[in-house]
Amino acid sequence: MKMDELGKKLYDVLGGRENILQAYNCMTRLRVQLNKKDTALLEAVKQVPGVMGIHDTEEELQIILGPGTATQVTTVLNELLEKTPAKPKIGDGRELHQQIREKNATPGKLLLKKIAGIFIPLIPAFIACGLLTGILGVSAKIWPEITASPTWQLLAVAGNAVFWGMNLFVGYNAAKVFGGTPILGGALAALISHPGLANVVFDGSKLVPGRGGVIAVILVAFLASWLEKRLHKLIPTVFDLFLTPLLTFLLAGVAAIFVLQPLGGAISSAIGAAATGAVGSGGAAVGFVLGGMWLPMVMMGIHQALTPIHADLISQFGVTILLPILAMAGAGQVGAAIAVYVKSKNKFLKKTVASALPVGLMGVGEPLIYGVTLPLGRPFIGACIGGAFGGAVQAHFMVGASAMGISGLPLAGTTNNIPIYLLGVLVAYIAGFIATYLLGFDDPAEERKS
C-alpha cells in the first residue's frame, strides 16, 4: 500500500478530524492522541495493511509502521487534518467572535495565523524575561551601584536568555508549524546564528552570524520543511531515515547562508527602519492612527502580521516601539466599557461589564470587545478613539517594550519609560470614556436576568 493510501486509510479508521486530536511520530511509530478509542477501533487499526502492530497507552495510541514509513504516513495524516478543520465548539456564548473568525479564514489570514503560531509558544518566556529585564532596569536607575552585584549580573543574563536563544526557538517552532521536523528547523537556525560564521570568508567577505534575525530563520525553516516533505516522497523508504534529514539540512543550509540570510537581513533592516522612522518622524500623529486602527485590524484578522515584527524589533533594538502604541486600544476599550457601565440601566449588561473589566485592565480585551462594545456599536468607536489618544502619547515619547504577549497594566513593567506608559494608559481610559459617553448607545431592554 502506498504512503498516501495508508495515511488516508488510517485517517478514516481513526475517526477523521472529529476524533484525531494530534498526530506525530518517532522513528518507527505513528503516535496519535484521540478523543475516543475502544476495542473495535484498535482491532480495525491492526487490520490495516502496513500496520505492524499497536501499543495503546493512556495518553496516546502508538501505531508501529517502521522507519521512514512512520514519518511519511504522519505527514499525510497531518495534511488531511489541516484540510478538514474541526467543527467549532461554542460553549462560552461568544457567537459573534466565532462568526468573525470564520469570516476571516482567508488563505492570507490563515498564513498570518500560522506565522503568529510560531511565536505564541514563546510568549511565556518573553513575559518572564521582559518583566525581569524591566525590573532590573528600574532598579539600576534607582541604585546605579547595584549593577556591580554578581546577583544583579546573573539576573541580567537570565533576563536576556530568551532573546539570546530566540533564533533557535523560532526555528524549532517554525519547522513544526510548517510541517517539517522541528529539530532540523532549530539546527538550521543554530547554523545561521553560530558565532563561528564570523571566521568564514567567501569572496573576501566574512559571513555574519545571526544576520536577518527571525525573518531569515522563518524563511529557512519554511524551505527546509518544503524540501523535507518532497524528499520523503522521492527517497526510497529504506534510505529515508538517513538521507532525508541529511539532504534537508545541507540543501536548506546552503540556501540559508547564501540566499535567505541576506534576503532576511534586507527585510529585517527595512522593517526596523520603517517602524522606527515612521514613529520617529510622525510622532503623535502616527501613534494616533495606529492606536485608533488596532481594534479594527484585530477584527479583520490582520493583526497577527505584527507578531514577527515585534520579535524582530526586540531582536534588533531590545524593545518594540509598536507594542505600547497598539496596547492603548485595549486601554481605550476599558474606558469605553466604564462609560457603558455608568450610562446603562440594564442590569445584565452592567454585570457583564463588571465581570470583564478586571481582565480588561490586565490586557485581556476579548470579553469587553465581544460582550460589550462591539455588540453595542458606538462604544466600539469610542474605544478606538481612546486607543488613538493613548497611542499618540506612546509614540510621541517613543516608549518601547521588551516583551510580547502582554498588554494593559502588566506591560508597564517591561517598558523603558514606565511613568509615560502609564500616562498613556490613563489618557486612553479617559478619552475612551468621554468619547463613548458622548456618542451614546442604544441601551438594550432588560431581557435576561443577571
Image: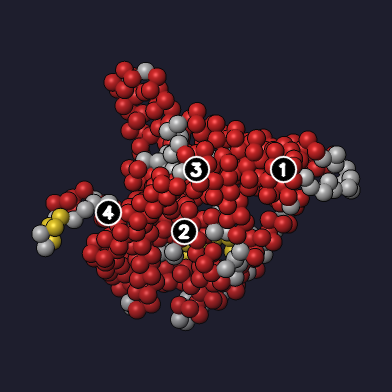
Residues at marks 2 and 1 touching, judged by CB atoms closer than 8 Å: no
Q: Can residue 211 be seen in this view?
A: yes
* Dot 3: element: helix
In this view, the residue in front, 427 or 411, is 427
Task: Answer left or right for 197 relative to 421.
Answer: left
The answer to whether mark 3 and mark 1 are in CB contact below 8 A is no
Above or below for 159 versus 16: above
Q: Which residue is drawn at 23% across and 51% down?
A: 209
- Report crowding for label 3: few under 14, some 14 to 19, many 20 or more residues within 10 A (C-alpha): many
Which mark sits nearer the N-terminus, 2 or 1? 2
Give the amino acid at mark 4. Answer: Arg
The one nearer the camera, 439 or 121, is: 439
Where residue 36 sits in the image (x, y, percent)? 65, 61
Judging by the rendered image, the residue that carries numbered circle 1 is: 436
Identify the mark nearer the N-term, 4 or 2.
Answer: 2
Residue 269 appears at what percent x and percent y? 32, 54
- Where 359 falls versus 223 (above or below)? above
Residue 69 falls left or right of residue 105: left
Q: Disc 2 marks which residue? A: 115
Q: How crowded is mark 1: few (under 14 residues within 10 Å), some or many (20 or more)?
A: many
For the C terminus, which image quadrant? Answer: top right
The numbered disc on residue 284 is: 3
Q: Which of marks 1 and 4 is nearer the N terminus?
A: 4
Specify the amino acid type for callout 3.
Ala
Q: Describe residue 19's horizontal placement relative to residue 121 as left or right.
A: right
Marks 4 and 2, Cα distance to the nearest angstrom?
20 Å
Q: Residues within 10 Å of mark 2 (few under 14, many from 20)?
A: many
- Position in image of residue 96 (x %, y %): 72, 57
SS at badge 4: loop
Q: Which of 2 and 282 is in front in this view?
A: 282
Give the percent coordinates (x, y) of residue 329: 59, 45
Q: Residue 211 carries which label?
A: 4
